[in-house]
Image (cartoon, rainbow, N blue to C red):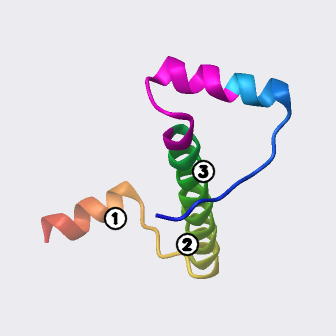
Amino acid sequence: MSTITFRVSEAEKEFIQKMAEFNGVSVSELSRNNLLESLEDQIDLDLYEKARQAHRAKDESISLQEMKKVLDE
């Protein structure tokens, strides 16, 4: 397993340690999980924005009434 180091202030260090303790995990686990979750959220947001732009470019939405007609046929 690799190691990544980053610098924080004393106050940030204390806060991170308290949050790790509060969550019942190590500082390493807390940092790793939150960092990876944040990066995954960025990817999800980017994919959402691209899908939204594609939808705007070619909107194929139909109304509820139109959908009912399609499903009844």
Residue behind mark 1: 66
Q: Which class describes the residues within 10 Å of circle 3: few (<14), some (14-19), or many (20+)? A: few
For the C terminus, the quadrant is bottom left
Residue 38 or residue 63, whichever sits in front: 38
Classify mark 2: helix, strand or loop. helix
Mark 1 crowdedness (10 Å alpha carbons): few <14, some 14-19, many ≥20: few
Location of residue 69 with respect to 50 vertically, above or below: above
Q: Residue furthest left?
A: 73
Mark 3 or 1, nearer chain start: 3
Magenta-colored span: 16-29
Check disc 3 and report the residue beneath it.
35
Image quarter of residue 65: bottom left
State left or right for residue 47 relative to residue 68. right
Instruction: Examine the structure image and report whether residue 46 is included in the region drawn in magenta.
Output: no
Q: Decide which of 46, 58 is in the foreground and name it.
A: 46
Q: Amino acid at mark 1?
A: Glu
Q: Residue at x 83, y 28 (%)?
A: 10
Does residue 12 lie above or below 64 as drawn?
A: above
What amino acid is found at the position of numbered circle 2 in the picture?
Ala
Q: Marks 3 and 2, how far apart in space?
A: 25 Å
Residue bearing mark 2: 51
Question: Cβ–Cβ below 8 Å for labels 1 and 2?
Answer: no
The picture places residue 43, in percent across and down from the top left corner, at: 58, 66
**Residue at screen point 62% across, 60% down:** 42
Q: Secondary structure at mark 1?
A: helix
Q: Which sits earlier in the primary sequence, circle 1 or circle 2?
A: 2
Closer to the eye: label 3 or 1: 3
Query: What residue appears at the point 34 percent right and 64 percent down from the top-left corner?
Result: 66
Quick one: SS at disc 3? helix
